[in-house]
Image (cartoon, rainbow, N blue to C red):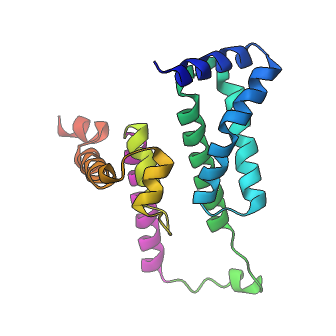
Amino acid sequence: MSTASREAAKLVTRAASGDRKAWDALVEAYGGLIWSVTRSYRLSGAEAGDVSQTTWLRLCENIGRLRDPACVGAWLATTARRECLSVQARRRSVVLVDDIASLEADDEPDDEVDTRILHQEQVAELRGALDRLPARLQEMLELLMQDDPPTYEEVAATMHLPLGSIGPTRGRALRTLRRIMEAPTACELSSMR
């Protein structure tokens, strides 16, 4: 374990026991990391501030349960990424309507409704498969599947990976995801018996 990792683990242990100076040191050491994650998602200043606060709150709630306190930086970065994705999802779900009457008109043919329901089921199935991937592969695919995905250079910097490993890791993640989605589910297996 490196000196930095040992120091991080000590800070986490002290902060978990209520040491205010340790919390301040954690914020000092990792605050910039969280802000760099929020910048990579192009959030507004208020959204970035919310993500930062929520990330620190999540650490406060879970600090005693971290599996590897020496990896607190990776834990914070992952948590910040997930919070950024949550903010982006909420942003996309907001619909501005200038005329409420347009909502009351139901001119949508049934086949469009069926298509939309099928799409929602496919998205849910994909989300379930993504959740079964190892956390590191989930992170990479979530970054690369954004509407405006970051460059490989930005992904490498965000995930602290060599630039040349992004493409092969992405390919491995997609192959694993495909295998998960093609594997029969427990329900399908029980119906085969």
Is residue 114 or residue 158 the one in the foreground?
158
Is residue 136 visible from the viewing direction of this image?
yes
- Please name the residue shown 42% across and 66% down the image: 119
- Which quadrant is home to the N terminus? top left
- Among all residues in the image, which is located at the extreme right? 20
Q: Is residue 177 above or below residue 9?
A: below
Q: Is residue 104 magenta?
A: no
Instruction: Classify residue 151 as left or right of residue 8.
Output: left
Left or right of 107 in this view: 115 = left
Near-viewer residue (73 or 125): 73
Front residue (pair 192, 91): 91
* Side of 176 where 60 appears, left or right: right
Q: Position of residue 164 (x, y in %)?
A: 30, 53
| Count of all numbered marks drawn on residues in the image | 0
Against 98, is 169 above or below? Answer: above
Horizontal relation, residue 29 to residue 130: left or right: right
- In which quadrant of the rendered view does residue 107 lie? bottom right
Span shown in magenta: 109-132
